[in-house]
Image: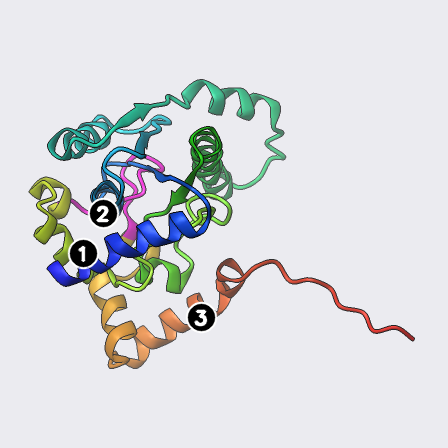
Amino acid sequence: MEQLANKLVLWIREQALAAGCKGVVLGMSGGLDSSVVAVLCHRAFLQNMLGVFMPCYSSQEDEEHALAVASQFSIPTKVVVLDPVFDTLLKALPSNGVEPSVSRLAKANLKVRLRMLTLYYFANQFKYIVAGPSNRSELSVGYFTKYGDGGVDILPLGNLVKGQVRELANFLGIPQPIIDKPPSAGLWQGQTDEGELGLSYEELDQYLVTGQVSIGLRQKIEPMIAASAHKRLPPPVASFEED
């Protein structure tokens, strides 16, 4: 784990400098992945990095966990409360009478995209790159918001499955309550990653690492991978041959 952590720290530093930037900014949600990325980025840039906590009707526990990580590792932070911005946008946007479940998802994605805008505001101000928290497990099945938490410059954990991220968190000394709590994007009350995915990270990791899973599980995962392919690719560009 020490070798992996050192490689990721070096990679983060190289990516920022190659982009002509002097540091890195990231969102701190109080979750496992963002906490790991925050510690790695802080190791890469002790001074020129910023963790931003962006509550948008978020839980008190998330804020406590994010600030606990910032305090333990002396990570520079800012808090930007997005509740009033979110409310203003909802008032301006039509509801169109859609199904409640669809409306809830649209509102949740709006929260995530507001956070993306906020991070790039700081990135522009300080000439930083934006680091994202997504891991290989989430990326593989499209469990991220396009142009939200997927709208970043680098993904330090993008080749690590969730179990590997948890191991890295233990090595880095991330507070145990963060490691132990059910993974959640905190998009609505009671929301969990595994509840939305319909399978556990352990099952998804096993599929990605070994490919040895039941037929039923394979039939659940592979359509998710196919349906989310567009989220992992740049926008297609139309090509026309001259007559």
Q: Is residue 10 above or below residue 30?
A: below
| Residue 52 seen by the camera | yes
Determine the CA span between mark 1 and mark 3.
33 Å
Q: Is residue 238 left or right of residue 155?
A: right
The verdict on residue 109 being magenta is: no
Q: Are marks 1 and 2 in contact (CB under 8 Å)?
A: yes
Residue at x 46%, y 49% (from the top left corner):
19
Indicate the position of residue 208 as horizontal and vertical percent values. 29, 72
Of tags 3 and 2, the one toward the viewer is 2
Q: Which residue is label 3 attached to?
A: 223
Kind of residue at badge 1: Ala
Q: Which residue is label 1 attached to?
A: 5
Q: Is residue 119 left or right of residue 88?
A: left
- Element type at mark 1: helix
Which badge, 1 or 2, comes first in the chain's sequence?
A: 1
Please rate how many residues cluster around mark 3, counting C-alpha atoms within 10 Å: few if below 14, some from 14 to 19, many from 20.
few
Q: Which residue is label 2 attached to?
A: 40
Residue at x 45%, y 37% (from the top left corner):
116
Residue at x 24%, y 79% (from the top left corner):
210
Indicate the position of residue 99 as horizontal and vertical percent values. 53, 41
Which badge, 1 or 3, comes first in the chain's sequence?
A: 1
Determine the CA span between mark 1 and mark 2.
7 Å
Q: Is residue 108 left or right of residue 191?
A: right
| Residue 1 seen by the camera | no
Magenta residues? 181-193
Kind of residue at badge 3: Pro
- Which quadrant of the figure has residue 185? top left
